[in-house]
Amino acid sequence: MAQRRALRSLMTSVAVGQAGFIATAAIVGLLAAEIAGSDLLAGVPSAIGTLGTAAAASPLAYRARRLGRRPALVRGYLGGIAGAGLAVFAGQLRNFWLLVAAMSLFGVANASNLQSRYAAADLADDDRRASSIAMVVWVGTIGAVLGPIAAPWANRVGLGLGLGEWVGPVFLSVLGFAMAAAITARSLRPDPLVVAGGVDRDIPFESPLRGIGRSWTAIWARPLARLAVFAMAVSQMAMVAVMTMTPLHMRDHGHAELSTLVISVHVLGMFGLAPLIGRWADRLGRLKVLSVGAGILAMGTVVAVVAGYLPSLVFVGLFLLGVGWSFALIGGSALLTESLPIEERTGAQGFADVSMSVLGAAAAFTSGLVKETLGFHWLANFATLAAILTLAAVASVSRAQERVAV
């Protein structure tokens, strides 16, 4: 009963929280390029937003370990409200660096979106853990697809009200984060981590860096946990690198209006098949799912390179990119959770999200430079290499597990 209640609450809050996040994430590159007058720095606000997610992941995990999931998730959404509100002012003032500062707070809300999947696993049975994670990932489709679709409409409404170009969609983020915070505070009762016995109110305070170091030690001692973090982080890096510059790549070839639809299809790939992926992960095993995901990710990046000037193939490539990422996220999250004892689990989950966010931020930060100097196709080539490395890592761990079994 407690698991079903928690799952319903998390699914509702993530749906609106994801809508809030994607509404701005889908257009921030366009807004940044408009303000800066160049594509060279267009990926910087997105990168800083991802760093904001990284910076918040460990403190939110510590707060969850000490007080429970509900206080931690609400705190993240409140930070996102502040960041989105500041981004509105930055867009109106056409102040690039204020936008960058705003995105650092904006990214905190995404830390709550991400950590909600772990809350879904707190009370799940072993044979339903991946499926529970997948349901929270899947429901993000509702908001994540509607966010980019609503962005052009919100932009037109904003322009009619006298707002700057691409400022209107940021208001959707304020609304989405506010609804997510309210739903979590009211409905996530009883707190799943408290019921699971994972809360310790007497743990001493530790700095984020010390917490990250302690979690890394716990993860490094377990090959399956290492693989889980590697697969999630590398897949995030590959996905962000290509996704961030796709709207600008399409604009360069006269398809700017289609870019938000491409992102919607990409997001559909990220979340839409999650229930099936979760079921496969529970039935076939985490390692097989990670292998399949890496293969699909590689296919998506190859299609993105082959696409050239054909918008239809860009849709296919970005959809496959999202599906591959979903395999890595769901399989990796389940594998990480079950590879660690409960007293180390929350901190390790925070570390995993830090790793994902840092590599994602690095990809977003450098994506504009790579596009400007080498071309969009090189972003896709680097992403293909990342997928191949993931395949190799899964194969290595699988062979080691087989030797131990023998």
Image: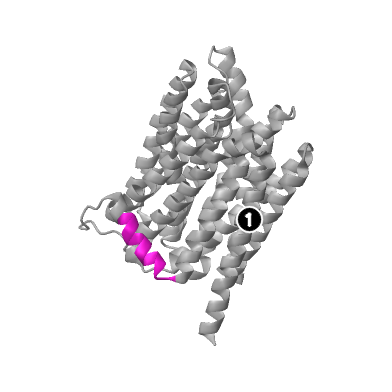
Q: Is residue 221 magenta?
A: yes
Question: Dot 1: within a 10 Å radius of its alpha carbon, few (fewer than 14), some, or many (20 or more) residues?
Answer: some
Colour scheme in use: one colour
Q: Is residue 96 magenta?
A: no
In the image, is 272 to the left or to the right of 85?
right
In the image, is 134 to the left or to the right of 272?
left
Q: Quadrant of residue 211?
A: bottom left
- Residue 290: percent from left, percent from top: 59, 63
Q: Which residue is mark 1?
A: 385
In the image, is 1 to the left or to the right of 35?
left
**Residue drawn at the location 45% of the way across and 52% of the way down:** 355
- Residue 44: percent from left, percent from top: 50, 34
Foreground: 93 or 117? Answer: 93
- Residue 222: percent from left, percent from top: 42, 71
**Residue drawn at the location 60% of the way across and 55% of the way down:** 386
Foreground: 318 or 355? Answer: 355
Magenta stretch in the rendered image:
211-222
User: Which quarter of the rendered picture does the C terminus lie within?
Assistant: bottom right
Q: Quadrant of residue 118?
A: bottom left
**Residue drawn at the location 35% of the way across and 65% of the way down:** 217
Q: From the viewer's perspective, is residue 103 above or below residue 239?
A: above
* Main SS category, magenta section: helix
- Residue 146: percent from left, percent from top: 61, 36
Q: From the viewer's perspective, is residue 224 above or below residue 69?
A: below
